[in-house]
Image (cartoon, rainbow, N blue to C red):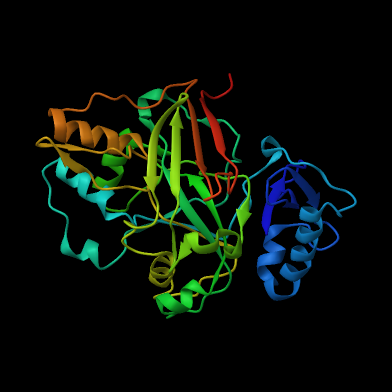
Amino acid sequence: MKLATYKDGSRDGQLVVVSRDLGTAHYATGIAAKLQQVLDDWGFLSPQLQDLYDQLNSGRARHAFPFDPAQCMAPLPRAYQWADGSAYINHVELVRKARNAEVPESFYTDPLMYQGGSDDFLGPCDDVVVPSEAMGIDFEAEIVVITGDVKMGATPEQALDGIRLVTIANDVSLRNLIPAELAKGFGFFQSKPATAFGPVAVTLDELGDAWEQGRLHLTVQSTWNGRKVGMCDAGPEMTFHFGQLIAHIAKTRNVRAGSIVGSGTVSNKGVEHNGRMEWPKGYSCIAEKRCIETLQDGKPSTEFMKFGDTIRIEVQGKDGTSLFGAIDQTIAAPAA
């Protein structure tokens, strides 16, 4: 099934069930008002939502209405936890290579993760408001999962059983703030403002054989100012699958229902063509493009985002239809 949260003036919005083709929706008020309620009592409430979903898809839902992504908050508008990984080691390799640094061996066996702010998320069509263009505004196209409870010490295989929903994210980064923050030794903070999520989150059965062993084997499309810049495969080159990422969190603590776990920037390896490395699948963040330019030409030439720029992130299923709906945002200055 597919679930979304509509804006209603409150902090947590109203849970809606969305049809498979993203054409219609139905309030889930009679079952649950908020997505967190469902995650807390998944075994009891999700079958009821599934019945409503089936009615919606068959045209039998009595109070269905046209689905509008612009009315959506993040599927889970605020969460108990937002933990983002860097599961595509190619991304790390590119960044390190561009500054002539080695990748530590531990990066290939132990996932990189940071704890992001989870009190304030952006809806899929909300503006990305940034204080200054000088901060180095960047998008990051990612796959994310939303979990149920996962016990401390869970294995990666056990952790996979805790995944309830999958969607996409734009993990906005302020690149020019990152070096000074990392130099302090405590990691990202101001350089990671509010993250945006796709209009709908879907259960694993909606993914079919595209979901395999904790990886989504589909293409993540990134379109910057109307130009498609990324067509990156999310599955084959994901070094750590979602079960491994969740188990990494659960090594020393319980992971509670309503935790969101990100893949990090979806990234694919380059290929050699006529003696020169090329990246035909493009990029899922501008920082990676700048690293590619540094490796190819000795210096970066692509600038970070400006006020008025747009970014669209989307994943299509194997039938060509939008799976989660699209993140479609504009970069904006703060209101006067």
Decide if residue 184 is in sight here.
no
Residue 205 visible: yes
Camera-nearest residue between 130 and 322: 322
Closer to us: 90 or 271: 271
Q: Position of residue 151 (x, y in %)?
A: 50, 79
Residue 133 % position (x, y): 40, 24
- Figure quadrant of the N terminus: bottom right
Dividing the image into 4 quarters, which one contains the C terminus? top right
Instruction: Judge left or right: residue 167 versus residue 242.
Output: right
Q: Quadrant of residue 283?
A: top left
What residue lies at 76% left-to-right and 41% top-to-bottom?
A: 9
The answer to whether 152 is drawn above or below residue 217 in the figure is below
Q: Residue furthest front?
A: 319
Does 48 sit above or below residue 140?
below
Residue 334 horizontal/vertical position (percent): 54, 25
Q: Is residue 41 left or right of residue 255?
A: right
Question: Image height check: is 258 above or below 285?
Answer: below
Residue furthest out toward the right: 62
- Indicate left or right for 110 with 168 as reference: left
Identify which residue is drawn at 67% across, 35% down.
70
